[in-house]
Amino acid sequence: MILSRPQEAALWRGEDVAAKAGVHGSAVTRTAKKLGYKGYLELRQELRRMHDQYLAAEHSNGRRAFRNEAGQTVLGQLVSKEMDSLSAASGSVDQHSINRAADLVMNARDIYIYGRGNSIPLCDQTERRFRRLGRSVHDLSGETDHDMAEQLLRMGEPDLLVVFAFRRSTRPLRQLLNYAEAVNCKVLLITDDLRVVHPVPVVTLAAPRGDEGTFTTLSVPMLMLNAIVLSIQRRYEHDVAPFQQKLKNILEGFET
């Protein structure tokens, strides 16, 4: 299980692995020791270190490309950087994870979307695209703490929290995740850094967006959002088609 989902496993606690594998917690520790580690904590640290090295390598390659193309225009360099980041994303997130994210969206009663700063445009696009699929969506990104708390009153086990979080965790994000865990709400995390959140999300989609010291793109998380939407349309065609047709009919009514 750990080897098949390494980027998510880097976030799991020992009890998370045991629950997902259907074994006792001691079995996880024994397995880690058989692999040459002192315990599961050391194994998890190694998984995180390996993923951090992968992200650092992608960022480093991007920096070199950006610096070595001095003859290009700024626009040309940005286009090259975007292409590098988008190419790296396909190696970071597999279709199985995208499908699991699509299933979470379609099986949720209500969907709550959270992001801050540069993530707000992503939240807006997510709300619009999920609503077009007939989903009940609540955008928390522009809310004050009090307004957000009011929207969370009905959050519960049938629901899904979609989080866009990059580089670091914030106090409001940690509080929101703790509350989601308390009410058994599932969490989908779209990020560029596996260390940013706890408790552990049900599904994590993590891909590098470029070097923090130069240019970081929103195209990569937008790409992952588009992949989720397209997977929903393919896997749940009969469920979403009536809503898309209804939307078309409503729009035609406005235009006449």
Image: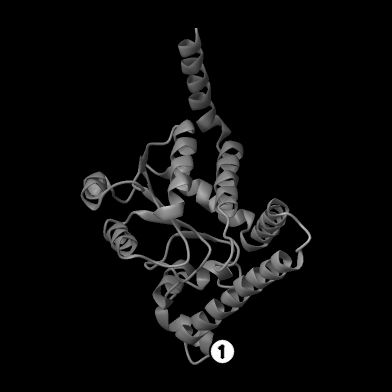
| Point 38% across, 36% down: residue | 136
Q: How is the image coloured?
A: one colour
Single out the residue that lies furthest toward the right. Answer: 71
Instruction: Confirm whether residue 106 shows in the render.
Output: no
Residue under pointer 1: 34
Residue 223, image x, y percentages: 60, 49
Task: Count every numbered label the image shows and give the total.
Answer: 1
Viewer-nearest residue: 179 or 149: 149
> Depth check: 65 or 140 in front?
65
Q: Residues within 10 Å of mark 1 (few under 14, many from 20)?
A: few
Q: Residue at x 63, y 73 (%)?
A: 54
Q: Quadrant of residue 52?
A: bottom right
- Callout 1: helix, strand or loop? helix
Amino acid marked by disc 1: Lys
Q: Position of residue 169 (x, y in %)?
A: 39, 66
Q: Quadrant of the N terminus?
A: bottom right
